[in-house]
Image: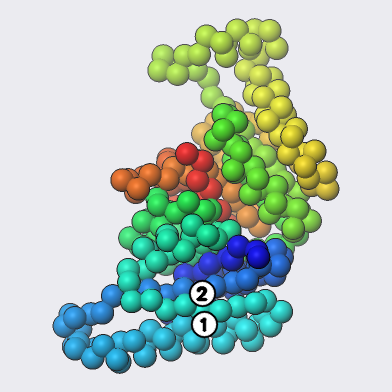
């Protein structure tokens, strides 16, 4: 059985938009969709619901039922279900994500420039989930060109790039979209001095030539696995986050690697920057 795609639902319009994106992805992948909502009883912290556990549970169940009804109305060919749990939302999503293709979450900031505003739930899921997490920013998805390319920021190390390239090539293949594989590079500093890199630079005629060669070599096995995907090799000097943010403006999906450590909410500076400024759905793939 196909692993499901999970969408976190919290009753906001942004989470409903994320559920719609997740349903579209489930349709493409012929995968089941599961809408999840977790909550903790208020236990006296709210005048409206304090002390009425049944009322809380009914309210939580209703928002989930409404989201499921909306998905089934607009994506009737997708196998969709919903699950409600009395437990912390981030904990629920992270645990269920162990057996999922991806988790899809909505952001809280709909402006076209200001980027994503992550709640603590989003940060905890991003830092702990073992599957890719897709962040959907409210307001931008309906205007996103559906025939545009998938953009992926490709790490230098093969072991870091494997999961990211697997996700990016599959995403491009099911969309019949081209994949722009991006390698950003910069001149070495006293803190990033690499004698071997400089030696190869002398042999190949410059640092850019080395990075082009390495990117092509890294992509070759994936090109053979996905011969139908048109790949654009994009090698550019400059900060990776700035380059990816600029390219995301015309992409239907941006794929970026992220750190995934249970003891930290830090997801890496490139992932952090793209979350704040990229104008596209972002798939954050754990790379180490």
**Of discs 2 and 1, which sits in the foreground?**
2
Residue 248 appears in the rendering: no
- Which coloring applies here? rainbow
Where disc 2 sits, the SS reads strand
Q: How many marks?
A: 2
- Name the residue located 54 percent from the left edge and 73 percent from the top edge: 34
Q: State left or right for residue 35 relative to residue 251.
A: left
Q: Are marks 2 and 1 in contact (CB under 8 Å)?
A: yes
Residue 195 appears in the rendering: yes
Name the residue at the left extreme.
44
Horizontal and vertical percent for residue 190? 41, 14
Where disc 1 sits, the SS reads helix
Horizontal and vertical percent for residue 154? 60, 37
- Name the residue located 69 percent from the left edge and 19 percent from the top edge: 209
Circle 2 crowding by C-alpha within 10 Å: few under 14, some 14–19, many from 20: many
Please state which of residues 254 and 59 is positioned toward the viewer in this rendering: 59
Q: Is residue 66 above or below residue 90?
A: below
Which residue is tagged 2? 35
Horizontal and vertical percent for residue 244? 57, 43
- Name the residue located 30 percent from the left edge and 87 percent from the top edge: 56
Which residue is tagged 1? 67
Name the residue at the front extreme.
1
Circle 1 crowding by C-alpha within 10 Å: few under 14, some 14–19, many from 20: many
- How far apart, in angstroms, are the residues tagged by discs 2 and 1? 8 Å
- Name the residue located 62 percent from the left edge and 17 percent from the top edge: 207
Say which quarter of the image contains residue 206.
top right
Say which quarter of the image contains residue 26.
bottom right
**Of the numbered discs in the image, which one, if any, rests on residue 43?**
none
Q: State left or right for residue 89 relative to residue 46.
A: right
The quadrant of the picture occupied by the N terminus is bottom right
Horizontal and vertical percent for residue 256? 55, 45
């Amino acid at each position: 059985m196909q692993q499901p795609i999970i969408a976190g639902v919290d009753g906001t319009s942004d989470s409903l938009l994320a559920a719609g994106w997740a349903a579209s992805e489930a349709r493409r992948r012929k995968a089941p969709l599961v809408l999840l909502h977790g909550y903790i009883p208020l236990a006296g912290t709210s005048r409206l619901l304090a002390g009425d556990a049944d009322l809380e549970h009914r309210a939580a169940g209703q928002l989930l039922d409404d989201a499921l009804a909306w998905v089934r109305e607009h994506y009737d060919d997708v196998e969709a279900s919903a699950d409600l749990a009395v437990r912390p939302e981030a904990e629920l999503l992270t645990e269920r994500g162990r057996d999922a293709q991806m988790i899809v979450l909505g952001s809280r900031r709909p402006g076209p420039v200001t980027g994503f505003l992550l709640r603590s739930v989003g940060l905890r899921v991003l830092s702990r989930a073992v599957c890719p997490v897709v962040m959907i920013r409210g307001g931008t998805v309906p205007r996103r060109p559906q025939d545009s390319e998938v953009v992926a920021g490709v790490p230098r190390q093969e072991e870091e790039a494997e999961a990211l390239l697997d996700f990016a090539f599959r995403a491009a293949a099911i969309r019949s979209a081209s994949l722009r594989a991006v390698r950003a590079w910069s001149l070495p500093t006293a803190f990033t001095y690499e004698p071997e890199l400089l030696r190869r630079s002398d042999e190949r005629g410059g640092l850019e030539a080395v990075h082009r060669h390495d990117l092509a070599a890294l992509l070759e096995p994936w090109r053979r696995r996905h011969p139908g995907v048109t790949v654009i090799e994009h090698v550019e000097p400059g900060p990776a986050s700035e380059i990816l943010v600029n390219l995301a403006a015309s992409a239907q999906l941006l794929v970026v690697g992220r750190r995934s450590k249970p003891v930290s909410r830090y997801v890496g500076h490139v992932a952090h920057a793209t979350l704040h400024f990229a104008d596209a759905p972002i798939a954050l793939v754990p790379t180490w």
